[in-house]
């Protein structure tokens, strides 16, 4: 029989804090996962889950998906009264039927390598993202285009913020995401890749880029840098880049958002490789 909670006890207060208290998440190494696809993806990729929280009561009852997860998963389950589950959910969506309490993944870039000699892996850097939703959307695009890893530079949005996890639609669980202080760690990673026989260039997206993205050769291993949504790439990142590219626009918008710019650039990388591989 699973444990059931009907009052706002200490455990519920801890889980609620994971919604918007980044310091608490970091201290405990835990975060919340909402939604059918994110939870399904976390399970499919073997992500370490500490607890599955489910909604008690029969009005409405749990879906067949939620029941299947609870019946087939070895993760401990805890039933919460609907009003307590509502506190753990998204405010406009009512009480969720299932929420997972997940553990942080190891995040040391120093021990990470991408690809093998002869490969041309792509890694994306997002410098100081303002918005958890934008970070999650970028991670989703990175996953869609087969990116090896996403690096979040500087003190920006948290990849374990529930809004980021939701916006990634589960891609957070299939693409490694690392935090880095700045360019120095990424340059060290680039140098390690080169030493492994994988020539790698750092390419920054900038409205004053030296050439349009579709005029730049992106066939080799690439570290693609996206700047902050408000201020663009910092001077330190511009100095770290081997090349800069722009995305030509024909409308009145002053710039693309970082997730859109990433999707355009990643599509161009994919297009070039598909075109010239034929």
Image: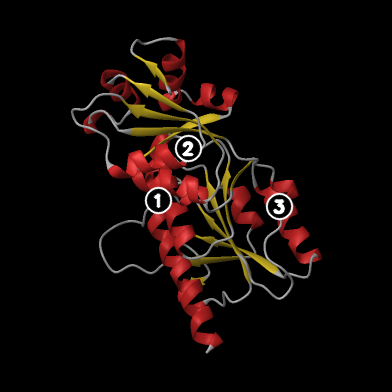
Using the rendered image of the protein, determine whether residue 207 is visible from the camera's viewpoint.
no
Disc 3 target residue: 112
For the residues labelled 3 and 2, the Cα–Cα distance comes to: 22 Å
Q: Are marks 1 and 3 in contact (CB under 8 Å)?
A: no
Q: Nearer the viewer, mark 2 or mark 1?
A: 1
Q: Which residue has dot 1 on it?
A: 137
In this view, 272 is above or below 186: below
Proximity of marks 3 and 2: CB atoms separated by less than 8 Å: no
At horizontal 65% and vertical 40% (from top left) the residue drawn is 106
Cα distance between the residues tagged 2 and 1: 12 Å
Q: How has the structure been colored for display? A: secondary structure
Q: Residue at x 57, y 74 (%)?
A: 218
In the rendered view, does 110 fall on the left or right side of 147? Answer: right
Q: Residue at x 63, y 60 (%)?
A: 241
Marks 1/3: CA distance? Answer: 23 Å
> In the rendered image, which quarter is residue 178 located in?
top right
Residue 244: give x, y in percent of width and height.
55, 65
Residue situated in front as seen by the camera: 165 or 254: 165
Residue reaching furthest to the bottom: 278
Quadrant the N terminus occupies: top left
Residue displayed at 53% across by 23% down: 23
């Amino acid at each position: 029989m699973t444990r059931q909670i009907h009052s706002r006890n200490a455990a519920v207060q801890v889980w609620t804090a994971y919604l918007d208290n980044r310091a608490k998440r970091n201290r405990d190494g835990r975060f919340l996962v909402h939604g059918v696809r994110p939870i399904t993806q976390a399970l499919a990729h073997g992500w370490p889950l500490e607890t599955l929280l489910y909604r008690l009561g029969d009005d409405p009852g749990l879906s067949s998906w939620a029941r299947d997860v609870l019946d087939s998963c070895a993760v401990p389950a805890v039933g919460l009264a609907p009003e307590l589950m509502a506190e753990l959910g998204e405010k406009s969506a009512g009480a969720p039927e299932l929420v997972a309490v997940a553990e942080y993944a190891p995040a040391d870039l120093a021990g990470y390598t991408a690809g093998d000699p002869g490969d041309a892996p792509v890694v994306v850097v997002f410098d100081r993202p303002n918005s958890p939703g934008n970070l999650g959307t970028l991670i989703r695009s990175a996953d869609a285009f087969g990116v090896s890893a996403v690096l979040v530079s500087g003190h920006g949005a948290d990849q374990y913020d529930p809004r980021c996890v939701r916006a990634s639609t589960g891609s957070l669980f299939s693409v490694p995401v690392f935090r880095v202080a700045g360019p120095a760690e990424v340059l060290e990673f680039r140098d390690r890749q080169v030493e492994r026989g994988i020539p790698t260039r750092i390419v920054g997206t900038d409205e004053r880029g030296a050439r349009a993205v579709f005029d730049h050769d992106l066939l080799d291993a690439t570290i693609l840098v996206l700047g902050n949504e408000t201020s663009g790439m910092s001077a330190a990142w511009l100095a770290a880049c081997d090349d800069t590219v722009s995305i030509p626009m024909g409308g009145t918008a002053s710039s693309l958002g970082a997730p859109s710019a990433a999707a355009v650039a990643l599509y161009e990388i994919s297009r070039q490789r598909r075109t010239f591989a034929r």
